Image (cartoon, grey):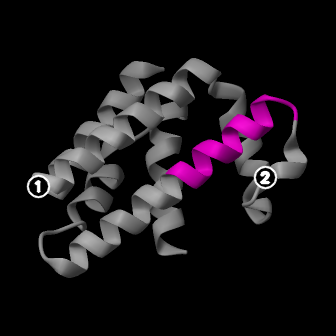
Amino acid sequence: MAARGDAMAILNSALLGGEHTQLFKITESYRAGAEGRQKTEQLLRTLYSLLRDLMFLGSGTPELVQNTDIQSQLVKMAEAADFDWIAAASDRLAEVERGMRRNLLRSLSLDGLSLALEKAG
């Protein structure tokens, strides 16, 4: 649930704009070490799951949404996200995953992801 809250904050910031202070507090919590790696991997899986739900909502198949308890929030986000943005966001997530394999700083990678998603919009 913590990963989903963080993922929603990242996507909300990218799609709907907002204050970056909270966003940077979130990404700063993804530190080095094994625990930070697991936390970041969970966040990335959650982001992929939410992007998939946004795609389902955007394509008119809400019955396929997995995160049904937050579907009303996802609907608002889906209105701001088109297929190109979702594809670009998926590409950015893949870049973060590649960076993790090269041991790049997780918090900086996530900051970069968040800002890149805003520019993709």
Relative to 104, residue 83 above or below: above
Residue at horizontal 19%, vertical 55%?
100
Query: What is the number of callouts on the image?
Result: 2
Mark 1 lies on residue: 105
In this view of the protein, which residue sits in the foreground, 105 or 12? Answer: 105
Q: Is residue 17 visible?
A: no
Secondary structure predominantly adopted by residues drawn in magenta: helix
Q: Which three-letter amino acid code belongs to the residue tagged 2?
A: Val
Quadrant housing the N terminus: bottom right
Residue 45, x across and y down, in percent: 47, 59
Rendered image quadrant of residue 49: bottom right
Relative to 26, residue 60 above or below: above
Residue at horizontal 41%, vertical 62%?
43
Residue at horizontal 66%, vertical 37%?
77
Residue 26, x across and y down, in percent: 32, 60
Is residue 77 toward the left or the right of residue 10 in the image? right
Relative to 116, residue 35 above or below: below
Dot 2 alpha-carbon crowd within 10 angstroms: few under 14, some 14 to 19, many 20 or more: some
Dot 1 alpha-carbon crowd within 10 angstroms: few under 14, some 14 to 19, many 20 or more: some
The magenta region covers 48-60
Give residue 65's mark.
2
Q: Which three-letter amino acid code belongs to the residue tagged 1?
A: Leu
Based on the picture, tell me whether residue 6 belongs to the magenta stretch.
Answer: no
Residue at horizontal 64%, vertical 44%?
52
Residue 87, x across and y down, in percent: 52, 27
Q: Is residue 108 visible?
A: yes
